[in-house]
Image (cartoon, rainbow, N blue to C red):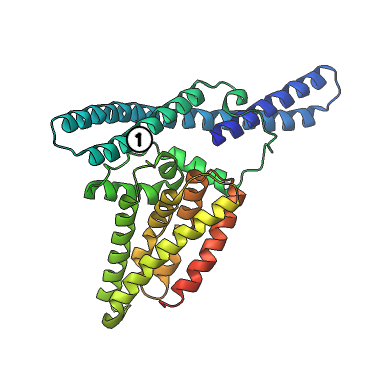
Amino acid sequence: MRVLQREFSKKEKAERLLSNLEKLKSEGAVADDQYEALRQKYSTAIELASDVITARKEEMKARLEEAEKSVVVYAQELKNLEVKFKVGELQADQYQREEQRNSLRLARAKQEIAKLQQAIASTSSEGVGGFIDVDLEARGAAAKLGEIEMLTGPIELGAPGTVQGYLQDAINAIKNPMTFFERMRVGTGLLEPMIFGGVVCFISTFLRLLFGEVPLGIGIVYFLSLVVGVAVGAIVILIMTKLLQGEGNLESSVRITAYSILPIIVWFIPYNIGILISLYGVYIMFAGIQKLHSLTAEKSAVAVLVTIVIYALLLSLLR
């Protein structure tokens, strides 16, 4: 939605300026060389904004299709749970937990469908939050990265709780962090991201032991330190995002840390090359905070910075 709001606003501003320029031209109040330079500038801004809007809407259509499928699946699961409870396969407390969890998933999927339909149907900034004044030429790092990600096309989310699903999500988190977190399933509990984070910590520990980067005697301590780092990072992110008036909860924060540590798997590469590569995890964390906690790029950067400082203090003990 923010991308559409920004690009629609940019397009509308450029169109207004171009219209004013044409009026000045007709009145003979602007030189030919000035006219051509500004006309090219405004026309290019309109074209670029239109391309981004089209690409974003195509990606949203893919997300809408998946969300509609999810609604069908969750609705059917609720019916199945009711039948299982009535025949005695599920106890009352178990049925209540499962019913609440699937009802929450269904409600979130319906909310996403409504938002996506509104965004796809929008034809101006008014339909996506209203006009905002933007610089036609300025394009921040986060905006550029987000637009690059759109060009890679829609991603396919992994099946929850399966090895193949975890692998697919890992690939998505590395390939398209912004899109991945924007489409991430949230509300299914802490177990799934905790398992993922634990597996990443285990793989990193195993590889460092295998290549002699970590002494065999402290392998368990190293692994536990990574796990504690993930937990502490999640708590810090939650506290910081709340202070910065963000949304989201502990589950969102655990998901962010679990996926942002993915690059530590390459820590076994010598000469600190692995450490340098793993810095990509900073961007993954930035994307997660911005999307799951609904913060601006500036506030997300502040939250990342504070979290990284605390990470550094913890991980300095592991080097």
* Relative to 73, residue 239 above or below: below
Taking the image as shown, residue 137 lies to the left or right of residue 277, namely right
Taking the image as shown, residue 283 lies to the left or right of residue 168, namely right
Asked whether residue 193 appears in the rendered view, the answer is yes
Taking the image as shown, residue 127 lies to the left or right of residue 266, namely right
Instruction: Name the outermost residue toward the front.
Output: 92
Percent across and percent down for residue 292 are 47, 45
Residue in the image at 38% along x and 49% along y: 173
Describe the element under mark 1 as helix, strand or loop: helix
Percent across and percent down for residue 147 are 51, 40
> Who is closer to the viewer here, 307 or 145?
307
Mark 1 surroundings: few (<14), some (14-19) or many (≥20) residues within 10 A:
many
Taking the image as shown, residue 230 lies to the left or right of residue 6, namely left
Percent across and percent down for residue 195 are 29, 56
Residue in the image at 51% along x and 26% along y: 119
> Who is closer to the viewer here, 163 or 247?
247
> Who is closer to the viewer here, 67 or 120?
67
Q: What residue type is labelled 1?
A: Arg
Residue in the image at 41% along x and 40% along y: 152
Point out the image quarter for the C terminus. Answer: bottom left
Percent across and percent down for residue 94 are 24, 41
* Relative to 197, residue 274 above or below: below
* Relative to 33, residue 254 above or below: below
- According to the picture, the residue beneath numbered tag 1 turns out to be 105
Q: Residue 179 occupies which quadrant of the picture?
A: top left
Asked whether residue 268 appears in the rendered view, the answer is no
Residue in the image at 50% along x and 20% along y: 121
